[in-house]
Amino acid sequence: MAEQTDKIHWHPGFYGAAELELLENQSELEFIREYHLGKEPLRVDLLVIKKRPGAVIRNEIGHIFRQHNIVEYKSPDDGLSIDDYYKVTGYACIYKSLGDTVDAIAASEVTVSFFREAYPRELVRRLLEMGLIVEQKHPGIYYVKGNVLFATQLVVISELASHSHSGLRILSKNAGKEDIRTFLKEARQLKKQGDRQNADAVLQVSVLANQKMYEEIRRELGMCDALRELMKDEIEAEIARAVEASKKEAEEAKKQAENASRETLQSDIGNLMRNTGWTREKAMRMLGVSFAD
C-alpha cells in the first residue's frame, strides 16, 4: 500500500515532540503554538517562554533558551534557506519590539531555534560566507555565533542522539525501528493526560509517514501491547462513546415503538367511537385501556 506522505500535517507532531523534549522543565515553561505577531498575519511556529527567569533547562536542546524563545520547524519536505533564516530572525525582531515599554524584552533574552531533519548544508555555507561561526555544541545541535542579533541554534533532527530525542527523530519518513521502540517505551511511562496527548500527536504523524514500518512493528506482540497501553485512554473513551451511542439508539427505538403503539391505540379508540357512537371512556374500557395508560 502506497504511503500518503504528501498530505501529512507535520507541525502538530512537532509541537507534541517539542513539549515532550522539555518535559523535565514543563512547570517552568509556557508553550504557545502558532504565536501571532500583533494583528498582522505573521506568526511563529512555536514560542517557548520561561515562566521562571532563572530556570535551568536540562534538555540539551533547551540549553540555549533564555526568557523568550522563537522556534521554527521545517517538515521533512521543506528546505531551510538563508531567506528563512532572515525571515525568522525578523520575526524575533518584531516580537522583541512588542514589549509594553521600550526595551521591555531585552535582545539578550531572545533566542531563535531552527529544526530540520536534514543538515541545511546550503544555509550553513551562506552563514559562513557572512563571517558567522557554526559550531556543533551537541550531536545534531549547532550554535550560530558571531555578529548575530539573537542567540541562534540549528537543530538537525536526524543527527540527534537517539536515546534522548526519539520523539523528534520519529518525525521522519524513514523513522528507525529502534527510535520507535524507544519512544513507545518512554510514552508508556507518561501519566498526565496532556503528555499522553502530545505522545499521541507524535505517533499519529509518525505512523502516517511510516505505515510499512508500523505494520511490521504491529506484528510484534510487545510493540502491539505498548501501542495498546499508550492508546488506552483513547480506546476506553471510544468504547464509552460506543456504549453511550448504543444506549441512545436503544432508547430511541423504545421511544419510537411506544409512539407507534400509542398511535395505533388512539386509532383503535377513534374507530370504535366512530363506528359505535361510544364515548372515549367506554371505548377505552372495551379495549382494556386505563386512564393512567
Image: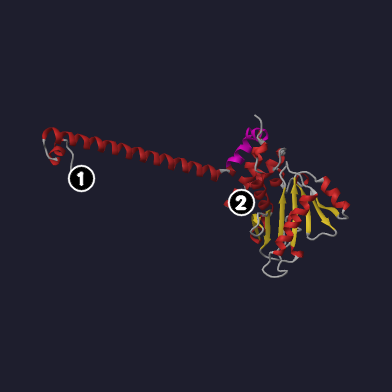
The residue at 80%/61% (across/down) is 149
Residue 19: image tag: none
In the rendered image, the residue lying farthest to the left is 277
Q: Is residue 152 visible?
A: yes
Mark 2 crowdedness (10 Å alpha carbons): few <14, some 14-19, many ≥20:
some
Q: Quadrant of the N terminus?
A: top right
Looking at the image, the residue that sits furthest to the bottom is 101
Q: Can you see residue 139?
A: no
Q: Residues within 10 Å of mark 1 (few under 14, many from 20)?
A: few
Residue at the extreme front: 40
Q: At which x and y percent is residue 45?
A: 68, 52
Asked if the stretch drawn in magenta spans residue 203, the answer is no
Residue under numbered circle 2: 195
Q: Is residue 156 above or below residue 50?
A: above
- Which colour style is shown? secondary structure
Q: CA distance from mark 2 to mark 1?
A: 56 Å
Quarter of the figure with the C terminus: top left
Name the amino acid type tagged 1: Ala
Magenta: main secondary structure equals helix
Residue identified by numbered label 1? 292
Please state which of residues 143 and 100 is positioned toward the viewer in this rendering.
100
Give the residues in magenta: 212-228
Q: Amino acid at mark 2?
A: Asp
Location of residue 224 by image quarter? top right
Taking the image as shown, residue 2 lies to the left or right of residue 141, namely left
Front-most of residues 174 and 264: 264
Q: Position of residue 195 (x, y in %)?
A: 61, 51
- Of badges 2 and 1, nearer the viewer stands 1
